[in-house]
Image (cartoon, grey):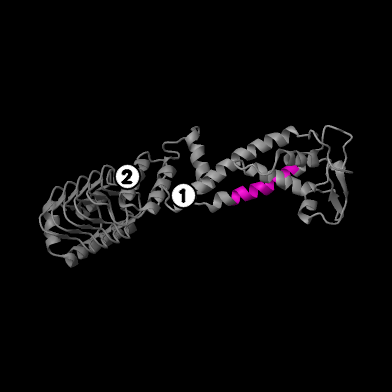
Amino acid sequence: MNTEESLALYARGRAAWNEWARGMIAEREALEAAGDWVAGSDRDIWNDATRDWHAAAKADFSEHEFVEAAHFKDFLFPGIAGFGGATFSGTAEFREATFSGYAGFIQTTFKGRTIFDATKFEKEANFNAMRGGASFSLAAVRFRIVPNFIEANFNEAPLSLKRARNYFKGDADLPARWRALKRLAVQEHDHEQELVFFKGELRSRRWAVDKVWHAAFWFGLAYQVLSDYGRSAMRPLLIWMVGIAGFGCVYLGQFPTLAVKPYWGIPWAVQSAWSDWTDDVRLSCVAGLDNPVWAALGLSWRKALPFFGLGSREKLNQIYACLYGVHDTAVTTAGPLPAGFIPKIPDLVSGLGLAQLVISAVLIFLVLLALRNQFRIR
């Protein structure tokens, strides 16, 4: 329909409009059943039947000025809905309306109160460069495709802006759309949605802007896996704790097997890690009187807290001596360590310690960042 036909049908009220819309949907279903329907966007070249249907199902209000309040509550738009360049001088109500096709509000001006509560957008919704002069409510709105609010301007923050349902890879325009939504959430002081839109922006950059050979691609992927883009404190905390146990096992794995002696108290989990151990196995320190299992966990714990000096340097040397011995071959497990001893530190352990230090620093930072985001600390 052209603008005059659309306005004439709108003037007849919601019942008449929806009766026409349901008839158009039934006609489309008949075309699909007959195999005459060519799916595509409004930019595609359709066959004659599809082109005729789109022309008939289009609601065109482009450039029209609604001087009085516009009531589109519960309206069903079966095809393209064009409101580009239109002006709503009074209230514009689209509450619980359904847009089955493309909804275009490019450069639309909303001077009065605007309501899109519980509105459904089944296809693309384009609000590019629109202007909102009063309250603009998007409570419980549902977008199936990320909406376009690029260059949209609001005198008042939009209310209850919700996120789009789906993410689409490979579209270079999507990051800008998510960025525009994030700006609106900041304007609304909706911190939770701000984080959601920030997540959408970073995810949409992958493949479209950040390619696999870019460092940003891998940093973004790691940020997602480790902390859900700064939204989860529990995820990096659990990874950090598992890392302490894992690195502890690796440190213990460098323990010389010649120091193994019988003992009933060794934990079953440690015994099962070594195929040649039995139920009566005990690890004795290479040098010193500590327990090498706890020494390995203690070493991992120290490396996992890079910003805290846990214990003295002497205690750290005792841990190394217990696990790997000292350079003085006369020292054994028969007595305490002498003063001034120099522990042996395998190169692999030294390198792993540095790696754990860096990894732990990153994970602790992500935990703190998530807590900051959770409690809105500025």
The disc at residue 372 is 1
331 vs 130: above or below:
above
143 vs 285: above or below:
below
Q: Quadrant of residue 267?
A: bottom right
The disc at residue 26 is none
Residue marked by disc 2: 180
Q: Position of residue 292 (x, y in %)?
A: 79, 46
Of residues 65 and 325, which is closer to you in this image? 325
Residue 125 is left or right of residue 345, and the answer is left
Q: Secondary structure at mark 1?
A: helix
Residues rendered magenta in the picture: 238-251
Q: Amino acid at mark 1?
A: Arg
Q: Quadrant of residue 174?
A: top left
Of residues 104 and 190, which is closer to you in this image? 190
Q: Amino acid at mark 2?
A: Ala
Residue 173 is left or right of residue 95, and the answer is right
Residue 141 is left or right of residue 254, and the answer is left
Q: Position of residue 260 (x, y in %)?
A: 86, 46
Q: Position of residue 257 (x, y in %)?
A: 84, 42
Is 351 inside the magenta-drawn segment? no
* Residue furthest out toward the front: 339
For the residues labelled 2 and 1, the Cα–Cα distance comes to 23 Å
